[in-house]
Image (cartoon, helix red, strand yellow):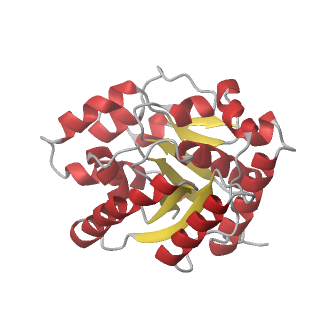
């Protein structure tokens, strides 16, 4: 059975969706079976894979139970995707009246979990019911942290929410790791933020850091991961290294007969 990883940070602009799309693509290139569940009403991961945001069924129908997860999956060269669009923003209100509202996404993804090695859930940039659903569906959390001062301020809010989710709803939830994004080793600020994050999350910060790279910003407008848009860029190289480090912690199963 696959491992579900929620990519979460309630602060926007930290490289959350960029990390989701490009890490998933890099892992797919290295032989992993990967599903990305776009659970952000902005649908940026959906367009990052070159998919039409208006397609249906989407994550909205999946979480409300009107379509099975398997029917919403779209296959791409860089991994499978459950797309999202702005309709998902309405699910926050509709979920309130439903039974097991916090477990709707988990129940849906459990039906396809054995088909994948990793399921990445791209969460919305806020601590709302959709994010709570993602925390309940996840085995672990991957937290991208931008190497800027204000990025540290929101971490305490995130950790508080994660603690509550773990205590009350998903006791098995663990921290997968922290990825430093928009890193510039030439600045004291990036170095200071990196040290502070390592102090908060001892042993959980990935050695692979994601640099500031214009190619990472440009790739989504072309609907492809950076490894396709510019495979020789610093951004593509960084996510390839991150994927290798991720696989050292989460080895792929050896095929039977190998």
Residue at horizontal 57 percent and vertical 28 percent from the top: 47
Residue 34, position as x, y percentages in the image? 61, 51
Total marks placed: 0
Q: Residue furthest top?
A: 54
Q: Residue furthest left?
A: 97
Residue 164, position as x, y percentages in the image? 25, 66
Residue 85, position as x, y percentages in the image? 42, 27
| Viewport quadrant of the C terminus | bottom right
The answer to whether residue 7 shows anywhere in this view is no
> Is 234 drawn above or below residue 209 in the view shown?
above
Res. 116 image quadrant: bottom right
Q: Residue furthest right?
A: 232
Residue at horizontal 51 percent and vertical 42 percent from the top: 13
Residue 44, position as x, y percentages in the image? 52, 33
Q: Residue furthest front?
A: 188
> Is 75 drawn above or below residue 9 in the view shown?
above
Residue at horizontal 36 percent and vertical 73 percent from the top: 172
Q: In the displayed structure, does residue 69 sit left or right of residue 249?
A: left
Res. 79 image quadrant: top right
- The residue nearer to you, when weighing 184 against 113, is 184
The answer to whether residue 40 shows anywhere in this view is yes
Residue at horizontal 84 percent and vertical 42 percent from the top: 231
> Is 167 drawn above or below residue 125 in the view shown?
below
């Amino acid at each position: 059975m696959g491992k579900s990883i929620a990519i979460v940070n309630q602060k926007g602009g930290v490289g959350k969706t960029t990390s989701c799309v490009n890490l998933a693509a890099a892992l797919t290139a290295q032989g992993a079976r990967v599903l990305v569940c776009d659970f952000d009403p902005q649908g940026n991961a959906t367009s990052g894979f070159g998919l039409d945001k208006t397609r249906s069924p989407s994550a909205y129908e999946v979480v409300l139970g009107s379509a099975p997860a398997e029917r919403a999956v779209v296959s791409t060269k860089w991994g499978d995707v459950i797309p999202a669009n702005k309709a998902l923003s309405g699910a926050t209100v509709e979920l309130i009246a439903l039974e097991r509202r916090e477990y709707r996404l988990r129940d849906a993804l459990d039906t396809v979990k054995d088909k994948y090695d990793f399921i990445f859930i791209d969460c919305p940039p806020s601590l709302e019911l959709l994010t709570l659903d993602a925390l309940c569906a996840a085995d672990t959390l991957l937290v991208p942290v931008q190497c800027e001062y204000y990025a540290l301020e929101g971490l305490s809010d995130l950790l508080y929410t994660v603690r509550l989710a773990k205590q009350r709803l998903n006791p098995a939830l663990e921290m997968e790791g922290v990825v430093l994004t928009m890193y510039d080793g030439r600045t004291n600020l990036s170095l200071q933020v990196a040290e502070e994050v390592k102090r908060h999350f001892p042993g959980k910060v990935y050695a692979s850091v994601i640099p500031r790279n214009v190619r990472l910003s440009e790739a989504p407008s072309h609907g492809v991961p950076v490894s396709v848009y510019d495979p020789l860029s610093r951004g593509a190289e960084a996510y390839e290294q991150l994927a290798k480090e991720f696989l050292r912690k989460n080895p792929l199963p050896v095929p039977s007969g190998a």
